[in-house]
Amino acid sequence: MSLGVRSAVAWLLMLVCGSAVAAPVVVGSKNFTEGVLLGEIATQAGREAGADVRHQRQLGGTRILWRALQDGSIDAYAEYTGTLADELLQMPGADIAAMQAALARDGLAMTAPLGFDNSYALGMRRAHASELGIRTLSDLRAHPTLRLGLSNEFMSRADGWPGLRNAYALPQSPDGLDHDLAYRALANGAIDATDLYGTDAEIPYHDLVVLRDDRAYFPSYAAVYLYRRDLAQRATALRDALHGLEGRIDAATMQRLNARVKLYRETESAVAADWLGLEAPDSDGRAARIWQRTREHLALVGISLGAALLVALPLGILAARRPRLGQGVLALTGVLQTLPSLAVFVFMIPLFGIGAGPAIAALFLYSLLPIVRNTHAGLTGIPRELRETAAAIGLPAGTRLLRVELPLALRTILAGIKTAAVINVGTATLGALIGAGGYGQPILTGIRLDDIGLILEGAVPAALLALAVQGVFEIAERALTPRGLRLAARH
């Protein structure tokens, strides 16, 4: 190997190794206020200890965080022992030592409890519960017509509604809804009971009564931090900071911190910094936040749509040229379109980690059908005599496609691309649940904090972007359609 080649290889190795060292460690958090607060406390404590830490906020439910931790997309997040034992490790009743041993086999570790237990519970408005004489979960059996609205995750968890219903023989048929919206529904009388977290600030604020778990169904939900064991080599400061938080947060403190965010509209960053005795980090203004989310959203839509064009246009042409094969192509892209978007996003996490990668992959799949279908429809809709005339004058197949067929089908093809782009603008908001950013971030935060201003901060720009995309394609259609075809279309 020559000296020059060796130097180049050495330089590349230094660059790669240097990038690996410089890459920040990532703390994740679930999509509820306490999870975000604990994530922010861990992040700021780690930075104060000298670690380069980034907080990936509100990444959806338990399974998303767990998978992200397992595949290394994040390095730590706050979890609860009951969830860990019953839902994730499938070890009901396991103690701390048994859970630590199971985690170690997967290259993971956990801290000792932080000092509070945030158990699941069911709650009702105090006046309504008193009127019906309901004090315990067993009392619910006598009231089969009660309207239960339970969080979507609780509805399907092993330690949630299915087990609770069987343990207490409950006759109700609950509806699933977002946890934060359930409090509003409960306060307004739209539902009679919902699932609670023991440290939720809304319990005293709405004067709710927590129904006693008289059969001791729910396990202990002591808060801990889970983290990857290799932090001992990569980010010792963060690992030590996580263990330094053990036993420091009691239930009353956690409920008070939650209240400062949920009820008094303080930011999680400011509340976490105040509790740690640190200076609150600077926060961006609304204009800067919208500009950042716009760049993120445009990247999600633009990259996914560009990749879809490279695949869907040839597929549409193939479907038009070979009808039998085309039916299979159209059927397959149609099936992809029917898959629930959030499920596709989550399915992509093992392949691409969290962040923009899985969101772009999912949006790419959703872009295929409109482009493939419209390309196929545009080409097969060309009058037969025009195609025969082009062939009769001796034009090669490639030339006929580029000079005759695609221009004639252009308006239909552009309509499919426009449809795909507008769909992507809306669907991309769900990418915030897996850390992709974009306009979904303020929408999710606004829903969580019941803040209409934050919801509009994401919803209004998303709607304007959809209109702008539609307008751009209208202009592109006029510019790209040959003048003769435009004149023919008017007559």
Image (tube, rainbow, N blue to C red):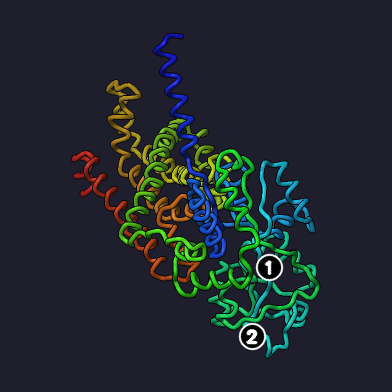
Q: CA distance from mark 1 to mark 2?
A: 19 Å
Residue at image position (75%, 52%) is 90
User: Which of the two residues, 424 or 251, is positioned nearer the viewer here?
Assistant: 251
| Residue 236 higher or lower than 44, as above or below | above
Q: Which is more N-terminal, label 2 or label 1?
A: 1
Residue indicated by mark 2: 126
To which quarter of the image does residue 280 belong? bottom left
Q: Is residue 10 above or below residue 236?
A: above
Q: Secondary structure at mark 1?
A: loop
According to the picture, the residue beneath numbered tag 1 turns out to be 119
Q: Position of residue 305 (x, y in %)?
A: 39, 43
Q: How many marks?
A: 2
Q: Is residue 348 visible?
A: no
From the top left corner, tell me how far across and down residue 177 is, in percent.
58, 68
Query: Is disc 1 surrounded by few (<14), some (14 to 19) or many (20+) residues within 10 Å?
Result: some
Amino acid type indicated by mark 1: Ser
* Residue displayed at 39% across by 41% down: 303
Relative to 323, residue 251 above or below: below
Is 359 left, or right, of 66 in this rendering?
Answer: left
Q: Name the image quarter holding residue 379.
A: top left
Quarter-of-image position of residue 230: top right
- Relative depth, front residue between 88 and 476: 88
Q: For this rendering, which residue is in front, 361 or 211? A: 211
